[in-house]
Image: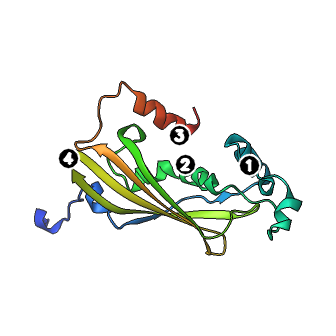
């Protein structure tokens, strides 16, 4: 019987947020844009531009049919939040962070029938003044791989991980992941 020295085994290294900087995660599922979802979103944000509800009005502006309001991209970002925390923002949950900055570049309007995919990336992580500052990017492409939108989001959390929020973070996390 032979024995193997412990040094021959490579022990798994725990992943930390530091290890995730520069890493990408492609969202597991795509988001298909529906006509009624666009109309519903436009109503919910009180955007009454006719290009969001009326095909003819959108066509007069040079589009093939209704287009989503610019801020509709936030729906796609919200849909991939669970994957962002599970795969890149290691050690944090929704209740741990403050959404401090958002930048959006819309490469083209979001249209009915688009099937959009997210490529998430943790672009930067730093600590300053007792806070963890994380910058993420979400490159959203259509079913042909063409860019539709790019978002950059800055999150801030207390250094040291989870705070005592009386379960509020778990409640928010449950709402975002399971809708209630």
Rendering coords of residue 154 (x, y %): 39, 54
Query: Tag 1, which secondary structure?
Result: helix
128 lies above or below 3: above
In the rendered structure, which disc, 1 or 2, sits on the residue that comes first in sequence?
1
Disc 1 to disc 3, C-alpha distance = 18 Å
Q: Which mark is residue 37?
A: 1
Give yes or no for contact between labels 3 and 2 (Cβ–Cβ under 8 Å). yes
- Label 4: state its secondary structure: loop
Residues at marks 3 and 2, CA–CA distance in whole angstroms:
8 Å
Q: Which residue is mark 2?
A: 78
- At horizontal 35% and vertical 67% (from top left) the residue drawn is 22
Q: Give residue 146's quadrant in the image.
A: bottom right
The residue that disc 4 covers is 129
User: Which quadrant: the N terminus?
Assistant: bottom left
Q: Nearer the viewer, mark 4 or mark 2?
A: 4
Q: Residue at position x 66%, y 70% from top?
A: 143
């Amino acid at each position: 019987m032979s024995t193997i020295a412990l040094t021959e085994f490579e022990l798994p290294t725990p992943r930390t947020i530091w290890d995730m900087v520069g890493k990408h995660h492609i969202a597991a599922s795509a988001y298909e844009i529906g006509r009624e979802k666009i109309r519903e979103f436009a109503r919910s944000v009180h955007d009454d531009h006719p290009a969001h509800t009326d095909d003819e009005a959108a066509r007069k502006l040079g589009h093939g049919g209704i287009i989503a309001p610019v801020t509709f991209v936030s729906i796609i970002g919200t849909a991939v939040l669970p994957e962002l925390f599970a795969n890149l923002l290691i050690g944090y949950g929704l209740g741990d962070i403050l959404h401090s900055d958002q930048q959006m570049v819309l490469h083209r309007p979001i249209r009915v029938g688009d099937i959009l995919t997210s490529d998430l990336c943790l672009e930067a992580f730093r600590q300053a003044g007792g806070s963890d500052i994380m910058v993420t990017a979400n490159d959203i492409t259509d079913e042909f791989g063409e860019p539709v939108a790019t978002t950059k989001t800055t999150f801030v959390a207390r250094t040291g991980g989870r705070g005592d929020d009386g379960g509020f973070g778990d409640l928010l996390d449950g709402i975002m992941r399971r809708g209630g």
